[in-house]
Amino acid sequence: MPFREINSKMVEATVVPGQRMFSQRGAMLAYRGDVTFTPNIAGGQGGVMSMIGRRVAGEATPLMTVEGNGTVMFGHGGHHIQVIGLTGDTLYVEADRLLAFDGTLEQGTMFMGSQGGVMGMVRGQVTGQGLFTTTLKGHGAVAVMAHGGVVELPITPGRPVHVDPQAYVAHHGDVRNKLSTALGWRDMVGRGSGEAFQLELSGSGAVYVQASEEKL
Amino acid sequence: MPTLLSLYPGPQYLLRVATFRLQGSKVLAVSMTGDSVKAKNGSMVAYDGQMAFKKMSGGGEGLRGMVTRRLTGEQMEVMEVRGQGTCWFADRASEINLVSLHGEKLWVEASNLLCTDAGLRTGTTFTGMRGGATGNGLFTTTVEGTGQAAIMSDGPAVVLRVTPQYPLQVDPGAYIAHQGNLQQHFQSGVTFRTLMGEGGGEAFQIRFEGDGLVYVQPSERNTIGGDL
Amino acid sequence: MSTPVIHDPTTLPSDDNVNPYTFCVELKGSQWFLQKGKMIAYYGRIEFNGIGHGRLDRLVRTSFHSPLHASDWVVAEGSGKMLLADRAFDVNSFDLDQGNLTIRSGNLLAYEPTLALKQSIVPGFVTLIGTGKFVAASNGPVVFMEPPMRVDPQALVGWADCPSPCHHYDHGYMTGVMGGVRALTGIGGTSGEEHQFEFVGAGTVLLQSTELLMADRAIGGPPAQAGVPGGHGAHGSGQSVPGSVPRLPGQLGDLQRRFGL
């Protein structure tokens, strides 16, 4: 586990030679030792990184590669940090919530539209993430940011959880998601036009929800 | 006296009244069994089970106060949530404080009220010209009855007791709620004279006298006069 | 579930935290310096006066040496207990024993007059010297670290005992053509970590957990005088949004906005 939680808003990562790590640009608070931070340019770095790089055309979530030998402190914007350990399963997370993660994790993007049909497209508009969500798979740790800390809500078969898309942080497990409109929801939650939707998660797994309806 | 649910009168009552539970300090989980709660509009972050959301519109008793508030420019809309299951509420990462009422009255800044159960009535009182200088507190929401209320604060609230022996001065921007038999006075008279000739003018405070409790938050809303 | 604790003047702590975000100062006929706007409530008889108040002249002469900040401070005097807080940031007290500590001016909330407050030569920072207690806010709990280390300017709260920091620029960023082009144009992006404050020597560095700068009041600039860092008046006003524009070598990054802009 490369992340040590120093407090609710700061994590310390140990960087060792030959093992890189990715972090959101500008999220480094301090470091010791010989560590380099290289911005990832779309296409410039091979493989999976370019996928993420290309995906968000506007570079909405700039990442950087962290390499070397030393310790790095990460934190960003006063947001709470939740470290999620992955043991072979897949984490679905909005890219702009990623603070830092193990380089060993297999990164991918999921086309949310494929699950939600038309609603999936709506979801893209809702979350401002395009139609894709980042997936991280394998064994390793992910540090995720949330406004005001997160609660983990279990999802069990026959008991789906409905989430305000603005408060949704991440989920893992064998979970189906779909966007729907609830009766009266539009009136209730209607702060922005997009908020008339709710995200329904069913299956078995867990969803992380933050204590705020404000996106990062 | 803010006490928690354990002091509820009886099990038959519990069955029909929503259970308030804090998950962490910033998320309120409300378990409902067919009953309803009133909550700040847009504050639901997740639910399971069956929930129906209804916007509260003008006309209802006690509710008129909420609507009146719109006239004062404060965007404070309330929704009614009814159902079976658990509903999670949170608002901009605010800390949530549970207050249990047994027939007494709670005065709370409208924007700090997150959720009340069906046993409570809400209304609005005019609290005087306190807001004249600060822009807040012209109207205060009152919560009355027997039940649970969840109030929000920016950072965990500090609950301060006021007795005749110990009156209390509070910055208007840090005030969130009070209960008990308290008189509040709007107090000025803190003067600043500085080297730079800036900051002249007065800071305003609310002075509480009597017997009761005052909730303050470790943060200050922007106030014009409360520059201390 | 915890029942909220109800405080009264007898149960409130004396010069200690009520919770991580609220600090209680007890005055027994004594005085404290206090940044304006940080007192949220008090019991007792306490008077608040601006720094320039004539009666305080002597106190100010011994304990307050920062004309730039004078309009931000008041002196609390009397007896009672007062609660200090700052936008729900973490609040902590620190004790200095014949020591010195330099802190970002916006983070300092209050201090005992047994300490002397002076402007640091690093713009935007003040130094406390002497013996006594002070109260500071930080975004997230303060983390103490020992040099050698490099710190993102925005995460720096202050430092004690060690020499003032110097600027460190990433080697590749300085020499590489790509780095230069990136920095100037933003094309290709920068990692955002090309520039840090570097601390060496013995001492303690205080970090806050986030890069969200605590907004603080405009403090004006130091005297426009040769040899005074930052003492060059109204130049460089182009960089109005810290962090959004890549920093150039020689610029002070986020400190620049304190140059009297």
Image: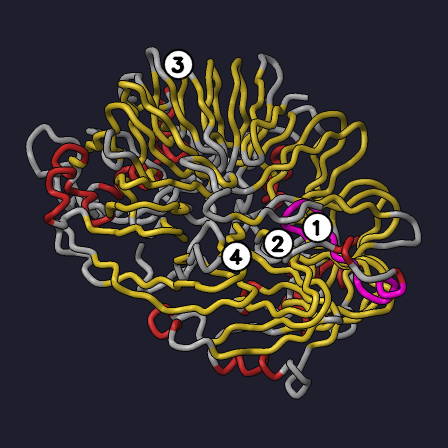
Q: Earlier in the sequence, mark 1 or mark 2?
A: 1
SS assignment at label 4: strand
- Cα separation between marks 2 and 3: 41 Å
Q: Which residue is mark 1?
A: B22
Residue type, mark 2 in image: Ile
Residue type, mark 1 in image: Leu
Does residue C125 appear left or right of residue A53 in this picture?
left
- Cα separation between marks 1 and 2: 8 Å
Please say if A187 is above or below B11.
below
SS assignment at label 2: strand
Q: Are marks 2 and 3 in contact (CB under 8 Å)?
A: no
Give the residue at the far front of this rendering.
Answer: B165
Percent position of residue B226, x then y: 33, 60
SS assignment at label 3: loop
- Cα separation between marks 4 and 1: 18 Å
Q: Are marks 4 and 2 on the same chain?
A: yes
Give the residue at the far right of this rendering.
Answer: A158
Q: Which residue is mark 4?
A: B215
